[in-house]
Amino acid sequence: MVAEHTEQGDVPGSDKPSPEPVGRERTATPTRSPAFALALGHRWGRGDLVWRVLAAAGSGLAQLLALPPHGLWWLGPLSAALLAFAVAGTRVRRAAWLGALSGATLMVPLVRWQDIFGVDVWLLIASAETAYFLPMAMGLALVTRLPAWPLWTAALWVAQEAVRARWPLGGFPWGKLAFAQPDTPFVGYAALGSSALVTFSVALTGGLLLWSVLHAVSARGAVRGDRSDRSGRSGRSAPAHLGLAAVGLAAGAAVVAGGTPAPALGRPAVADTVTVGMVQGNVPGVGEMSILGERMQVLDNHADGVHELADAVRAGEYPRPDMVLLPENASDIDPFRDPVAREVIDAAADDMGVPLLWGMSRFNDDGTRHVSSVVWNPGTGPGQVYDKRYLVPFGEYVPYRDFFTRFVDRLQQVGSDAVPGTEPGALDVAGTTLAVGICFDVAFDLPVREAVAEGGQIIVVPTNNANYNFTGQTNQQLAITQLRAVEHGRPAVVVSTSGVSAVVEPDGTLAYTSEEAVADIHVAELEAVEGTTVATRLGAAPEALLSALGLAAVAAAVVIGRRRRA
């Protein structure tokens, strides 16, 4: 593969240089090294389009393999590098469909677990997620024409993920570059700038890698004196190119290494040690759209788990916990409206003798419901409540119900629409403040951040992934929780109906994981933390700043391009 470059006028809608106009004298135009700015018309040799297509598809595949359950995290930077390679020097229209190819290669298999609701739902979500890669790729094609382009390309990754996490219908941030780095050197940046800074560091490392490779190729061309490689007409000698390649590699290595000490900056202090019990009751029909089984079966499974844990504590098999955590939807009956369900939970709390955090749906008079985690005290019953803030469209509620149910009969199975909560999930349980984010909440920066800012000392993620057991979805969500633990400098507990339940250390490593589709009980000693990390205090500011940086670079590239054509 040989890099070729021209800055002659281009035929509109084509990536091939146009012929010189008759009667006009050809003017030589100075060019830069491709490692600094990859101008419009840059080509990757005779097989330019083939290389671009392979790189775009390879970018999506690399990110897919970087994410759980594959976990080849080091492919994350390569994904960013390949997408920049695919679109650099091309027109924005071609960049758009190359971006679509990259996005589809990632998203179609990544959200395959959504086919539990139908192939049409799966492909609709995958298509919507893929759409965000089109404008990002167009922006990448523009900013790679600027000096210092690895910075601008990394910032554009942040901007794409920021929009995808917010719109439409509240967003769907699955598959972020950051979410492939749950316990790697990159994850430390989460303590300084949340998932946005992790994504930026991964993409920047990939950009610097490509930058270094291009300089190394230019050095090789200079040594061989190959003047057919017109991209090397920068006036630099082979040693200069090799020196710049080494600088790029050193900078990339510094970015990777910098994540390790990052959490130590402003690390919160340990306030106390808390003993936490966990109950994974299991549900019937895991991996199916309906997991409820017979009436009260899910509630009985989890109540039985609490009684089993109480017996094990009395037998000396586990230390006595200060509290017991149960998953989202641990009751399939609303105990606020069903006296029998309330008696079951009361009996479990009394037998355990400590407060329980129990997941359930609480129905409203208008037929809607809240997906809640309720503190249930022995003797006195329900106390504080947290209502899930980010709901799953078409799973927990049907947006524009009258419209969509005309075309998709299965949506009628979502019998009542959940409504989102509005308050942070900071719950006082046995003298410890828990930062609660239910299931889908954890994929978004805001819910856990606000719960920690309100005093949450331990992150708790009750979840119900029974529809998705053995699909990789549970592993993907767990990786996000690992990042949240580092982001806020706290241990995290995931408690699931059917796995994976887990205990996560503040550095993102896993101290305990359960198996999937089995009943399980566990007790863990955790450090309750006071204070906040830099990321918690800064909130969305790093994301906003980096996004603005990327968008400003796009604007600058457009303005500069117009001036050159004038």
Image (cartoon, helix red, strand yellow):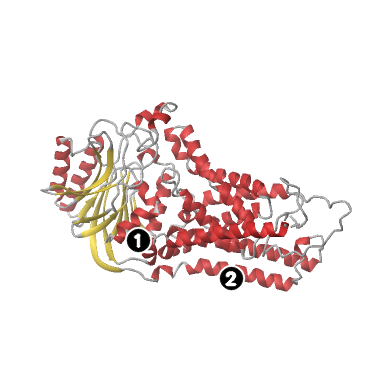
Ranked by sequence position, the earlier of labels 2 and 1 is 2
Quarter holding residue 288: top left
- The CA span between labels 2 and 1 is 30 Å
- Where disc 1 sits, the SS reads loop
> Is residue 175 something one can see in this rendering?
no
Residue at 72% in and 57% down: 566
Where in the figure is residue 85, as x and y percent of width and height? Answer: 65, 55
Q: Residues within 10 Å of mark 2 (few under 14, many from 20)?
A: some
Work out whether residue 149 or residue 114 is closer to the camera in this orientation and state it: 149
Location of mark 2 (residue): 250
Q: Would you say 238 lies left or right of 82 here? A: right
Q: Amino acid at mark 1?
A: Glu
Location of mark 1 (residue): 505
Q: Is residue 441 above or below residue 193?
A: above
Where in the figure is residue 542, as x and y percent of width and height? Answer: 45, 62
Work out whether residue 181 or residue 189 is closer to the camera in this orientation and state it: 189
Q: Amino acid at mark 2?
A: Ala
